[in-house]
Amino acid sequence: MNNQIQIEAKLKGLASEDAASFLMETFPIEAANYSDAFQVMAHRSWKKTDQLRLARFYLKKSPFVSAKPYEVFASFMSLAALISVVKEAISNKPNDRQFIAYHVAPLLKKSIRTEKDRDLVARFITELKSSQTGLDPTNQARTIDF
């Protein structure tokens, strides 16, 4: 816990871009303790570009055994951005769609604030449960530009 407090203090003292780089270097997805990144990530604000960088970096490891990683990203990302990155992460893992849907669908439904959100979430959940995930024929995810 003391180490976590030190890391959080260091992150707060860095610019968003530098903090994201530090987090990814300190907790690479290959490391046994990579999940510690989720514990400290939610304790600061991130620029949109760094939100996307972190999500793309860590969600490559999906599917996860819990919803925690998705919850952390949902705490500071827009629904559209989160859905876009999840689509990218599952583009190379079509067999994991149902498992990801199990964790992501309830979280996204709880995050709905507007009709636009509701439509976005409904479309994404339908895509997850169907045989298609919004992928183009070259098997690359469509992304949303921010």
Image: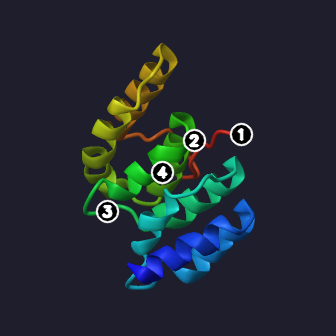
Name the residue located 54 percent from the left edge and 76 percent from the top edge.
7
Q: Do the residues bearing badges 1 and 4 touch, measured as CB atoms within 8 Å?
A: no
Pointer 4: what residue? 73
Precedes in sequence: disc 1 or disc 2? 2
Asked which secondary structure carries label 2, the reply is helix
Residue type for callout 3? Phe
Pointer 2: what residue? 81
Pointer 3: what residue? 64
The picture quadrant where one finds residue 16 is: bottom right
Precedes in sequence: disc 4 or disc 2? 4
Precedes in sequence: disc 3 or disc 4? 3
In which quadrant is the N terminus drawn?
Answer: bottom left
Asked which secondary structure carries label 4, the reply is helix
Q: Is residue 74 shown left or right of residue 80? A: left
Residue type for callout 1? Phe
Asked which secondary structure carries label 1, the reply is loop
Q: Do the residues bearing badges 4 and 2 touch, measured as CB atoms within 8 Å?
A: no
Pointer 1: what residue? 146
